[in-house]
Image: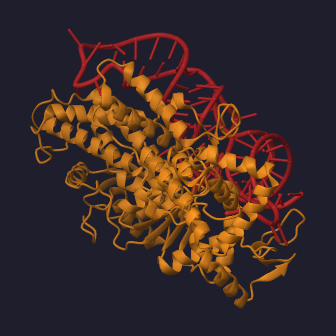
Chain colours: A orange, B red
RNA sequence: GCGGCUGUAGCUCAGCGGAUUAGAGCAUCGGUCUACGGAACCGAGGGUCGGGGGUUCGAAUCCCUCCAGCCGCACCA
């Protein structure tokens, strides 16, 4: 069956559709609660809840549902236990679904018929400051989400909300002037941002005259002094160029065009204040202009303000966030806003969203979510830091992973050498770091353990790459001497059938990521698929099989390899041909 | 004090729109195989799902409460 876009609709969706129709006949809107099963292929658990609401015996209701259920050509159904519906796909349908996947480069993932404009705010490093572990999760998770939504056909607008404004820039610009522009540019372009920033900071703390100059410089910056603005732009451009190098190293899709920093909204801040005032939402409190959305209190139980304009007439970051939100809704036409920002900002963002709703800047129709994530912990289960207590530079972290991957390759006979090994080591390192970050439930903290991450065994990125490389190896040997058309998909061996059922679930896994904004749903799926494949691989010789059975097994290899490669690519992970 | 997140096998983690015996990886122990890349596969041991209540025919999953850890709670972003 095809849907409107001409793409295959997932097997799960097709079954769910038919089940919903049967449930609707008894009670409109009742949820069949369909899921994968170890008993049949799928099981529907919704009968018991339905029976309760109807006040009838579950098995009786189950029989009623079955009577209304039309699974003709799709599956066999049986009632089990207290009222479970166990579904088993018919062999013909399973074969048909596999054939369709075989001819579909998207492996069953439909192009959304109604593309949405999805704005994803992620990464957000600070100008003239080093990128460190604190930026890892936002960058990796945000990029994975961007890839998944893009692939689904939505228009993704990445927004890298870099910190490029505020009082520190007086100090940074003065330091730039002191060391000389050429010197500063050389230092920054080498990625030596920590040294630059710390030197500025040190002088600022020690030298009152420097402090005074810095203060004056902030005023000049804010009032638009051309020379000051030029110097500021030098800092900004150098930093963005550096960030871009880091993104390239990580294979992250962010570009300089995605950088729309805090400074971009300066001109809109007055309007934010004026409009909030006009809406009667703005109150003066302690000399500052604030909005008090309901439901937020401080430690004394008093109303908690969102400070829009500070006592000193400066704007807080809340004003910037509100201006950015309005821009995304009004000018970019966002249907969805995702903020991939750490958990500590949860309350701040909640308040920003609440105020935006109050001001009618954020329509109900816009999906607006804070994509929270936990901390990266060290082996001591505390925030990951260097031995000297500083935050770990992102590039240092990748370099370390590359080193481990290089060692692992070197230890293995027959692995590629020279430049090829270097490329491979980088691909493995990215897979290790990204997969470890993406494969746990986002909101949890996780322990950063390079040894485990880079391992080729277990639930790791490199393991998935390896599984893919083995599949490709088989396919290379087979050459062009097989075809999907010749594969009957009889699936006589249970391992073949188990793998086939896994392959049908790819579209559902990507859909789950879009619904939950949890990339780990895709990770879990891919790891499960890789395990199904190895079980198949063990039980079913491929190249030595004969006739149609060989075509069938090669087709399963091909689908497995394509699914792993595509799935990994949606996570921002490459799938090399050989390892 | 208020709010949020987290607490599942020795370790690292899934599962948490309730449902048929709580899963996986690593580690440990025991097996298998001339192996299409053995960086493999099969099996075993190991869990009062933080504690205690409650709802339910049924709770790791929903509600209440307590404990522990992390984070946030007005002018830094």
Q: Is residue A342 visible?
A: no
**Residue for point 9% across, 34% down:** A547
Front-most of residues B61 and A446: A446
* Quarter of the image that includes the N terminus of chain A: bottom left
Q: Quadrant of residue A448?
A: top right
Residue A232: image x %, image y %? 59, 63
Left or right: where A295 falls relative to A73: right
Front-most of residues A74 and A489: A489
* Quarter of the image that includes the C terminus of chain A: top left
**Residue for point 44% across, 64% down:** A257
Front-most of residues A458 and A545: A458
Left or right: where A171 falls relative to A95: right
Left or right: where A34 falls relative to A495: right
- Up the image or down, A263 lies above or below A76; here it is below
**Residue for point 65% across, 31% down:** A379
- Up the image or down, B20 lies above or below A410; here it is below
Residue A30: image x %, image y %? 50, 68
Residue A412: image x %, image y %? 36, 19
Residue A44: image x %, image y %? 45, 55
């Amino acid at each position: 069956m095809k849907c409107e876009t001409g793409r295959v609709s997932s097997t799960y969706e097709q079954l769910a559709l038919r089940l919903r129709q049967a449930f609707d006949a008894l009670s409109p809107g009742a949820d069949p609660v369909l899921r994968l099963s170890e008993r049949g292929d799928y099981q529907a658990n919704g009968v018991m809840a339905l029976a309760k609401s109807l006040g009838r015996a579950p098995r009786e209701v189950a029989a009623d549902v079955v009577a209304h259920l039309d699974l003709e050509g799709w599956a066999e159904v049986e009632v089990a236990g207290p009222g479970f519906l166990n579904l088993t796909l018919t062999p013909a349908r399973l074969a048909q679904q596999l054939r369709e996947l075989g001819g579909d480069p998207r492996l069953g993932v439909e192009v959304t018929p109604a593309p949405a404009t999805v704005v994803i705010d992620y990464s957000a490093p600070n100008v003239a400051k080093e990128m460190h572990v604190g930026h890892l999760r936002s960058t990796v998770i945000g990029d994975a989400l961007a890839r998944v939504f893009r692939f689904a056909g939505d228009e993704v607008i990445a927004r890298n909300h870099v910190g490029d404004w505020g009082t520190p820039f007086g100090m940074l610009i003065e330091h730039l002037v002191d060391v000389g522009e050429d010197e500063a540019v050389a230092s920054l372009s080498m990625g030596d941002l920590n040294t630059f920033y710390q030197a500025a900071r040190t002088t600022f703390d020690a030298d009152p005259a420097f402090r005074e100059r810095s203060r004056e410089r902030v005023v000049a910056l804010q009032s638009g002094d051309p020379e000051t603005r030029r110097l500021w732009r030098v800092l900004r451009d150098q930093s963005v160029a550096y960030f871009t190098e880091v993104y390239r190293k990580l294979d992250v899709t962010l570009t300089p065009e995605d950088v729309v920093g805090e400074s971009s909204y300066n001109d809109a801040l007055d309007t934010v204040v004026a409009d909030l005032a006009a809406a009667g939402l703005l109150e003066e409190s302690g000399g500052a202009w604030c909005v008090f959305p309901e439901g937020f209190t401080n430690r004394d139980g008093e109303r908690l303000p969102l400070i829009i304009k500070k006592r000193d007439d400066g704007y807080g970051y809340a004003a910037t966030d509100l201006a950015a939100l309005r821009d995304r809704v009004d000018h970019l036409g966002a249907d969805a806003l995702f903020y991939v920002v750490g958990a500590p900002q949860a309350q701040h963002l909640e308040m920003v969203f609440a105020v935006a709703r109050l001001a009618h800047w954020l329509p109900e129709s816009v999906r607006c979510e804070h994509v929270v994530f936990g901390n990266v912990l060290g082996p001591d289960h505390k925030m990951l830091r260097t031995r000297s207590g500083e935050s770990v530079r992102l590039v240092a972290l990748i370099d370390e992973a590359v080193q481990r991957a290089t060692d692992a390759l070197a230890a293995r006979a027959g692995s590629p050498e020279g430049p090829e090994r270097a490329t491979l080591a980088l691909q493995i390192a990215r897979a290790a770091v990204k997969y470890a970050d993406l494969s746990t439930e986002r909101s949890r903290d996780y322990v950063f353990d390079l040894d485990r991450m880079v391992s080729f065994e277990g639930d790791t990125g490199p393991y998935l790459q390896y599984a893919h490389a083995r599949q490709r190896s088989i396919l290379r040997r087979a050459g062009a001497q097989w075809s999907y058309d010749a594969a009957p998909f009889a699936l006589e061996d249970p391992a073949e059938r188990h793998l086939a059922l896994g392959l049908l679930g790819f579209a559902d896994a990507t859909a789950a990521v879009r619904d939950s904004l949890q990339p780990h749903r895709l990770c879990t799926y891919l790891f499960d698929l890789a395990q199904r494949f190895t079980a198949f691989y063990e039980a079913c010789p491929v190249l030595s099989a004969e006739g149609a059975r060989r075509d069938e097994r090669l087709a399963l290899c091909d689908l497995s390899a394509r699914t792993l490669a595509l799935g990994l690519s949606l996570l921002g992970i490459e799938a090399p041909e050989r390892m």
